[in-house]
Amino acid sequence: MISRHEVLISLYGAWRLFIRDPRGIDWLDDSIDGYWKSFFCALVILPGYIIWIALGSGELYKDVGLFQIASVETIAYVIGWVAWPLVMAYIAPAIGKDDRYIRYIVAFNWSSAIQIVLYLLVLFLGVVVKVPAGFAAFFAFFVLIILLVYHLFILRVALEASPGGAVGLVIGELVLGQFIRGISQGMLH
């Protein structure tokens, strides 16, 4: 089991990486044990994810039963957490970075906490503050760019990927995430 201290240190490491401090990686446990513990972040951010789904998908789910929503979203959440690490388990050795795989996945997993905070900020502005739709869309796009650059930085620091390779991996992870999201949303129509 992971301790609260380990969670806080890992979140701090993710934050340091977010503000572009490459030493943030030193705060993360890149052992095998740390690898498995990094998936605990899925539970840490689950309340935020539930809020994001509940408030951000109102129109999409208006004619769908609660059990169906919960079932599909739970499955999509689990798949979302394991799909990219599984893909990278094959890509990392293929590009000669298998010795950096665990360090990268640990950083990638803990970075989800920063991501959900930013997604909730976008949701807050659109749903609670009710900023104009154009501004909300611009802000959402801006946050997406920030998160893509964040992932790029993690790839460069943790996986030591080349600039071109890192861009390709960022795009690959984005496409995979959108594919999973598209299938789950399609199942709720």
Image (cartoon, rainbow, N blue to C red):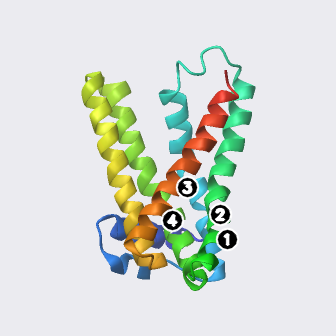
25, 181: nearer the viewer: 181
Query: Which of the labelled discs sits on residue 90, or is there none?
Result: 1
Instruction: Kindly tell me whether residue 66 is visible in this rendering.
Output: yes
Image quadrant in which you'd find residue 36: bottom right
What kind of element bears circle 1? helix
Give how far apart the Cα atoms at labels 4 and 1 are: 16 Å
Q: Nearer the viewer, mark 4 or mark 1?
A: 1
Q: Nearer the viewer, mark 2 or mark 4?
A: 2
Residue 157, image x and y in percent? 40, 77
Image quadrant in which you'd find residue 92: bottom right
Instruction: Indicate the quadrant containing the C terminus: top left, top right, bottom left or bottom right.
Output: top right
| Neighbours of disc 3 within 10 Å: few (<14), some (14-19), many (20+) | some
In the rendered structure, are the residues bearing label 4 and label 3 in contact, judged by CB atoms less than 8 Å apart? no
Q: Which residue is mark 2?
A: 87
Give how far apart the Cα atoms at labels 4 and 3 are: 14 Å
Above or below 178: residue 161:
below
Mark 2 or mark 4: whose residue is earlier in sequence: 2
Amino acid under disc 1: Tyr
Residue in view at x 39 percent, y 64 percent: 152
What kind of element bears circle 4? helix
Query: Which of the labelled discs sits on residue 108, or is there none?
Result: 4
Give how far apart the Cα atoms at labels 2 and 1 are: 6 Å
Mark 3 or mark 2: whose residue is earlier in sequence: 3
Mark 3 or mark 1: whose residue is earlier in sequence: 3
In the rendered structure, are the residues bearing label 4 and label 1 in contact, judged by CB atoms less than 8 Å apart? no
Residue in view at x 55 percent, y 55 percent: 44
Give how far apart the Cα atoms at labels 3 and 1 are: 27 Å
Q: Which residue is mark 3?
A: 44
